[in-house]
Every structure is written in C-alpha cells, then in structure tokens.
Amino acid sequence: MTLSSTSSGLSAADLSKLKHFVADNLTRELEAENPEYFQREAFVQKKLVEILARLPANIPASIRQQVMVEVKDDVLGFGPIQPLLDDPDVSEVMVNGPKKVYVEKKGKLIKTGVTFENNQGVLRVIDRIILPLGRRIDADSPTVDARLPDGSRVNAVIPPVALDGASITIRKFRKDKLSMAQLVEFGSISASMAEFLNACVVSRLNIIVSGGTGSGKTTLLNVLSSLIPETERIVTIEDAAELQLQQEHVVRLETKAASLDGKGQVTIRDLVRNSLRMRPDRIIVGECRGGETLDMLQAMNTGHDGSLTTLHANTPRDALSRTETMVLMAGMDLPLKVIRQQISAAIDVVVQQTRLKDGSRKVTSITEVAGMEGDTIVLTEVFRFEQTGTSPDGKIIGQLKPTGIRPLFTPRLEAAGFKLPPEVFGASMGDMLRRR
C-alpha cells in the first residue's frame, strides 16, 4: 500500500515523482546490462540500494524502504497488488478498475486501501501476466484467461467491455495441498462422507462436483483426484492448469488461445477427444462449460470409468439440467430422452459443494444418479447438510448427516473391496437386523 502524505511528511505528488525517478533509473540499468532471468532479482535489489543511496539525505529511511518495495513489486511482481498475492490469508484478489481493489479473506469480501495510479497501471499488470504465456488482450479480444507462475488463475477484462477501467480477478493457488482428513477437520465434510467418497473414487465411479462460483469445486476435485491409485494413468484437461495431482503417471493438458491471425486454438473439447487416444485410465476435466460435455459423457460410457469433472450449478438436479444444456451446445440434434439416458448411464455421483452465507465451504449433498424412470432421471440423496440455525456471530449451525439410504451401486463398491458398515449410511446394526 502506498504511504500517505501525512505519514511521510511528503505530498502524494512528491512521493509519486520519487517513485518514478527511482523506477526510471532502474529501468535504464536493466536495459543497459540485461541480466539473465535467474539473476534478475538479485540485480534489481543491488541496483535499488545504489539508486536510493544517491537520493538526498533528508529523505526519511521509511520512505526509502517503501519506495524500494513498491518499485521492486512493479519490476519483479505485479505492482500494487503484489502484497495481496503474498498474503497467505487472501484467497482471491479483485481489481475493479484502478481505484477499487477487493480481496476475499476467510470467505468474506473486503475492500482494501490498495490503488493503481491510473488505468494504464492495471493494463501493465495484465500485460505482465499474459505476455509470457503467449496470450493477447486488446480491443478486438478484450477478455483473457491466464495463470500466474505459481498456478493462480487469472481473468482479465479491459475496455471497451469493462466500462470502469480494466478489471483483474485472481483466484490464488494453494501452496499446501489439502487432504480429505483436513476437509473433515475443517468441517467441510463428515468422516462418513469422506469414507464414502474415497470408496467411490477408488471403485472407479464417475463423479461430478457441482457448485457455485468460489464454492471450492476445484479444491474438492483436487482432494478427490488425490485418492486415485498410483497404478493408473491420469489425463487432466483444464483451461488454466490448477490441479495439483501428486501421482507420478499424470499427463496434464491445457487449452490454447488462437494466435493473432485467429489460428491455432485448442479447446477443451479438442483435448477431451484427443485424450481418448492417449490410453487414459482416468480423465479429469477441470470444468465442463460447453459441447465438451457430450464427449465427456461418451468417454464415461465407453470404458473410462472413474472420470471426474466440475460444473456450475446450485443443486444436484440443476447440475443434470445444466449437463443437458451443455450437451445440446455440442450441436448434435439429439432427443432429450436420449441425452438423459446418456447422462444417467454415465454419471454415478453428484457432489454438491456450497459456499454458505458465513463464508464457510461445505459439501452440502452427495447424490446418486439412480437411473431413469420414464423420461426423468432419478436422484437419490445419500448425504446432506441440514442447517439448524445461525450463531450470534453469524456462523451457520448445522449437521452433515446420512439420509439412511444405501446407493444402488453398493455392489460395485463391495466388488472393489469396500464393504462400508451400515453406520456410514446412518443405520445401526440393530436396525439392519430388525429389517431382516
């Protein structure tokens, strides 16, 4: 954050001039010596110390230090938002034009005091993000998806589409990979749900993770993917690579935008089709958004069991409706009943991930796709989250609990070696004996 004139004794204009003076001198030094990439950070640090040492002695040490940090962030990082990216408590950074920068911390949106000098400052950060990736953004193509070197996902929008100045949204990449045990510890999932999902993944059931924006779908997909046995060949397909699979036998594929002449685009659908020729045991698609959904369903129905993907939807029923819509986007003139038969045959489980009003993220439903009844897909909820109230400090109070129903695919779990006890599904052994 830039120091204010009151805290420094200098006006904001003087502080800006000082920063530009130091930055201009550093830029000339960089252009003159052009250090190797791996030497660049040390070179910048050394030259900044030299340049600041030449400033008048009456400039306070606190101002010198602040100018050094800000110029270094501009040259090596992403300008004013670099401290936000460095903050481990920040999960998302949102730039709504040069004067409005928000962050998400612990599920809550907070406006920061960080600002850019003008719209050009935001555009410079966007260029710094996308240029190494070979992407482009201009008036003819005013939106772009990209990722930072650490894997964080970036979306940028510029005028004329962005009316109030260039916008940047950065979903930060977790450096520490979450485990299922940690999700249980955080209260995002119950121990019984975790045991059930582990059995589903290892038993090669096809799973869709459904949820709204920022609900934690990719995080959960990462956790589920980590349960896949080391002996299997996995192909991951993403718009911007986020998955952090630890298995050794993984092929990671990422889409490619069209070049300046409009050629060379590689879409999710292209990669899904190509993956079928790569002898995958599992196909993991980061997110289904369009016609690739049909190819994904066909893969699930033709021997690629155990595939995983995510999509945007607010309930398991909505997830299947959205899947129908995305299949139609493939351009195939298929009757709705045929599409639903494909969906019910391909998908075994829908896991609903939700961001609650208090900012917490939970698996609020695990639902079996139990086949067709006439023209309707039958869904059977196996686990659900039941809210019972709200605490005085705004925290959602509720329980993650089984519905008492065993899924129809239980024999598949047992064939894979998972004989889950009745307690997992909410029934005691006494209840089971009485039913007999």
Image (spheres, helix red, strand yellow):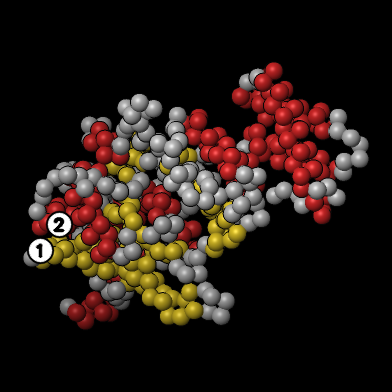
Residue in the image at 47% along x and 31% along y: 133
Q: Between residues 68 and 244, which one lies in front from this camera angle?
A: 68
Residue 149 seen in the figure: no
Q: Secondary structure at mark 2?
A: helix
- Left or right of 63? Residue 321 is left
Q: Is residue 73 above or below residue 416?
A: above
- Mark sitting on residue 375: 1
Dot 2 or dot 1: first in sequence order is: 2
Image location (x, y in percent) of residue 280: 27, 37
Few, some or many residues within 10 Å of mark 2 (<14, 14–19, 20+): many
Q: Residue at x 87, y 43 (%)?
A: 60
| Residue 260 image position (x, y, % from top left) | 39, 27
Whether the residues at callouts 2 and 1 have beta carbons within 8 Å, the answer is yes
Is residue 123 visible in the rendered image? The answer is yes
Residue ID for mark 2? 340
- Please say if 143 is above or below 28: below
Picture quarter containing residue 252?
top left
**Image label count:** 2
Q: Amino acid at mark 2?
A: Arg
Q: Nearer the viewer, residue 427 or 216?
A: 216
- Gap in angstroms between the C-alphas marked 2 and 1: 8 Å
Name which quarter of the figure residue 46 lies in: top right
